[in-house]
Image (tube, rainbow, N blue to C red):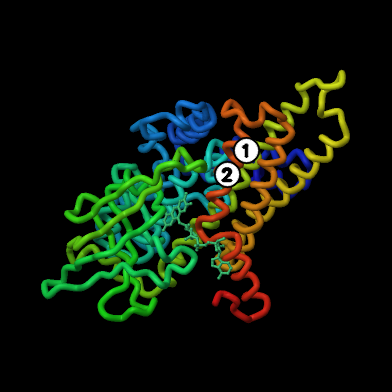
Amino acid sequence: MDDYRLFDAGNVVLQSGITFRGAKLAYKTYGKLNADKSNVILYMTSFAAHHSDIDWMVGPGKALDTDKYFVTIPNLFGNGLSSSPSNATEPFSGSRWPNFTIFDNVAYGLIMHELERGDSGVRSFASVQGALVMYPVFAFGTEEQKRHYLPKMASGEIIGCFGLTEPDYGSNPSGMITRAIVQKDGSWVINGAKMWITNGSTAQVAIIWAKTGEDKSDKSIRGFIVPTDAPGFTAKDQKGKLSLRASDTSELVLQDVKVAATALLPKTGGIKSPLMCLTQARYGISWGAMGAAQACYEEALAYAGNRVMFGKAIGGFQLQQQRLAEMLTELVKGQLLCLHLGRLKDAGTFTPQQVSLAKRNNVSAAADIAREARRLLGANGILAEYASMRHMANLESVYTYEGTHDIHTLILGQAVTGLSAFE
Ligand SMILES: Cc1cc2nc3c(=O)[nH]c(=O)nc-3n(C[C@H](O)[C@H](O)[C@H](O)COP(=O)(O)OP(=O)(O)OC[C@H]3O[C@@H](n4cnc5c(N)ncnc54)[C@H](O)[C@@H]3O)c2cc1C
């Protein structure tokens, strides 16, 4: 727990304490990771940090194409999932079946922070696999589904994606057109299209959200585990992204895709089910955005100490010190916000509105920090060799996905006034 106290100490050095040191101590404190798995996180973070060169980001092949990479990410936070079902007769629920954050929520957040310190695409991959794929299986699935999928997802043997957004329904997913019709034998036939789906072309399974039967209201929305090799299922990568280039983003088309009755996640019911998943992911995003901000702040600070102009290091000029002071302040505020939120989540008292507040604030603050870092770097700041502009571009996606900044504004507005301004 001492690592968390770094925050409580309230000194300005805490922004560096949260990084490797915090994450490593979190593992140690909670004793859930063995040495190898601790190495995984170090490997992952340095992988992300050191592969930000132009070949990796803009290269002709898939940005993330090493097997090792895919296998390790889910492992680091699926640790509990892969190790806990040692007794096959035990139900995968309750305290014996920890959620994917077998660490507490703060430790999980630190991991997201570290991954995104490397690249938002890395954290996005982990968020989707954990919060948007494993979580719905865990929360809404049958025992059989949990047993079959969760250990394999935790080990990275099965990669998943989360299909909610559609070409014509982004901020308002309740309007979705995708439809699943039950057949006489209990199987389902799904038709529709999903847009902007992270990991879409890499996934072996897709969690597809669809309206069911003739009920076109959002109450009929259910979730399905759909194998991506099912006849009629196609995934096509979105080309030309200037943001989150290290992440696959795809369009999914489902044309008369037939899935067994067992594909339905039986405890899903209505739009609140996918929204519950988003709450999990948004929590991690709040932490992750601060990781990206941390990377930018550190890059700017180092540059300020080295770059000499008008005969002295630019860090010695008041204007740049003010810039750094503002960056540091917003960084520390955002980290403290996540820390507090994590503690509320551990206590089981946090609300989706609080997550909206954190996601909205932290992503926006991180984007500002990244832009200021890029500016401090002068012309060098536009190069791929430095991380700030890459983070800045990435954070534009993070600003938009998982509820745009505007949508979280409306959520907060509704929470404080009791009046909905969505429509
Ligand atoms: C890189 C990336 C990865 C993604 N990954 C996934 C994924 O894995 N799975 C998935 O399901 N989706 C994913 N998304 C989709 C993402 O969640 C949507 O893009 C997002 O919800 C916004 O929808 P939209 O792009 O259609 O924007 P729109 O909803 O068309 O919004 C356009 C603009 O209008 C504003 N707006 C909308 N409604 C209102 C309102 N009521 N009042 C005021 N302003 C409003 C928005 O804030 C925005 O500025 C991803 C997106 C990106 C960019």
Is 171 displayed left or right of 405 in the figure?
left
- Name the spot of residue 306 as percent of width and height, x first: 76, 21
314 or 3: nearer the viewer: 314
Asked whether the beta carbons under mark 1 and mark 2 sit within 8 Å of each other, the answer is yes
Query: How packed is label 2: few (under 14 Cα within 10 Å), some, or many (20 or more)?
Result: many
21 or 212: nearer the viewer: 212
Secondary element at image label 2: helix
Mark pair 1, 2: CA separation: 8 Å
- Name the spot of residue 103 as percent of width and height, x first: 50, 49
Q: Looking at the rendering, which quadrant does residue 410 occupy? A: bottom right
- Mark 1 or mark 2: whose residue is earlier in sequence: 1
Query: How packed is label 1: few (under 14 Cα within 10 Å), some, or many (20 or more)?
Result: some
Q: What is the number of the mark on residue 146?
A: none
- Name the spot of residue 419 as percent of width and height, x first: 62, 81
Can residue 318 be seen in the rendering of this structure?
yes
Q: Which residue is mark 2?
A: 113
Q: Residue furthest top?
A: 311
Quarter of the C terminus within the rendering: bottom right
Name the amino acid, label 2.
His
Looking at the image, is 28 positioned above or below residue 259? Answer: above
51 or 81: nearer the viewer: 51
Secondary element at image label 1: loop
Q: Which residue is mark 1?
A: 19
Name the amino acid, label 1.
Thr
- Name the spot of residue 61 as percent of width and height, x first: 36, 31
Residue depicted at 82% across the width and 23% down the height: 313
Residue depicted at 27% across the width and 62% down the height: 143
